[in-house]
Image: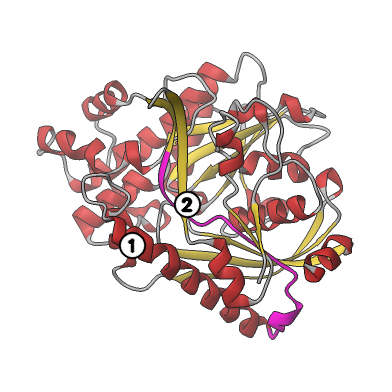
Amino acid sequence: MQKLIELIKKEKRNVIGLMSGTSLDGVDCVLVEITGSGTSTKFNQMGYVEYPFPEGLKDLVLKNSHKDSSNVEDICRLNFLIPQIYSDAVKFLCKKLNFPLEQIDLIGSHGQTIQHLPSSCEMFGYKVKSTLQIADPAVLAKLTGVITVGDFRTGDVALNGQGAPLVPYFDYILLHSEKLNRALLNVGGISNFTILKVNGKREDVIAFDTGPGNMMIDILMKKFFQKEYDLDGMTASRGKVNEDLLNSLKKQDTFIEIAPPKSTGRELYGEPFLKDLLSDYIDISNEDWVATITDFTAYGIYRNYEKFVQSKIKIDELIISGGGAKNKALTNCLKKYFGPSVQIRNIEELGFSSDAKEAICFAVLANELISGKTSNMPSVTGALRETLLGKICLP
């Protein structure tokens, strides 16, 4: 406990942020020096690494993310296995930077989502929303000897929120502008954006998941080309958008047209989403399939803006982060949909690492909890009130 008391008193903290998302390529591990909290937060990125998952782990996590193929023993073991990998990532980054592990003050770990069920269902007379991130932060704290904060989504869901997205708080305190209306678009497995009004207040922030990000593109790349992703969007660039398929995708989608607050994941946009369409459109070339799904991804982002945001806030900038920020074909599709009045930029132009942004977010969220600051956004998630997010686990 003494270690926690000393940490709370610190004005400057060395914090590791960890994020492994729906792409399941590995864990993003970043070291940042954080000063202050809330809108006074300042950070310096000291180092970043994407630490790969062992071969076969992605398939095992995916298997246990679907109710028809999951196994309670696998889930139990993964909950303890993944923190071991996270621990190795932390130690690897420290060694790479020649930064002593003992000087790390705090770890913020998102964990690995295997189920996210933000819609209520009735069980035994109770209405239940739920979310499950494995990779127990208590295990990570014991393995590293560093105070660890995890399970950030749970508190918001407990208060009837969606538990996602969590990045908007980070966007608000660090990326709001005094001159421009901004949309911060993160394209991971799922796409989500944060709308920041010029000089807006916390309650003015609009944010939600818009639909697919890289997820379905990655599925097709694996199926057709035995590749994990579409490097720089080159495959999509070689194909053409098939309008019939695009219209079928729009008709099949049940999420894009739903009003926020909303969040989604692999439960909707995994392989089952594509199964029937792949059978119906067998004459389309593989490249055209990837081009059409890429265009559909951009359409989902724009359609959400057009339907739920534009009448309230007309954006001047769309700033992209996440793995999708490197996909030139996706960027071109976004330019087509948003038109010349919206400047589309990569977040790296603002001095942020595109790859590390979400990991930095969870370092910042951990720092907020230690600083006693609420970090959910009820205007975004639909939660009943602001609340502290995360669980503090001692080494």
Query: What's drawn in magenta, residue-wise?
Result: 98-116
Q: Which mark is residue 133?
A: 2
| Residue in the image at 59% along x and 74% along y | 142
Question: For the residue marked with disc 1, what is the amino acid?
Answer: Lys
Look at mark 1 in the image and give the residue it sits on: 58
User: Which is closer to the viewer, label 1 or label 2?
Assistant: 2
**Image spot of residue 7 (x, y percent):** 82, 65
Residue 140 belongs to the span the image colors magenta: no
Q: Is residue 251 above or below residue 370?
A: above
**Image spot of residue 269 (x, y percent):** 33, 39
Q: Is residue 265 left or right of residue 196?
A: left
Where residue 345 sits, quadrant-wise, is top right
Q: Nearer the viewer, residue 267 or 343?
A: 267
**Image spot of residue 118 (x, y percent):** 46, 32
Q: Is residue 332 left or right of residue 107?
A: left
Residue 108 belongs to the span the image colors magenta: yes
**Badge 2 local density, few (<14 within 10 Å), some, or many (20+)?**
some
| Residue in the image at 54% along x and 74% along y | 87
Under circle 2, the secondary element is: strand
Question: Considering only order in the chain, which callout, 2 or 1, is on the residue closer to the N terminus?
Answer: 1
**Badge 1 local density, few (<14 within 10 Å), some, or many (20+)?**
some
Q: Nearer the viewer, residue 171 or 394?
A: 394
**Image spot of residue 344 (x, y percent):** 59, 39
Q: Nearer the viewer, residue 77 or 98?
A: 77
Q: Nearer the viewer, residue 281 or 120?
A: 120
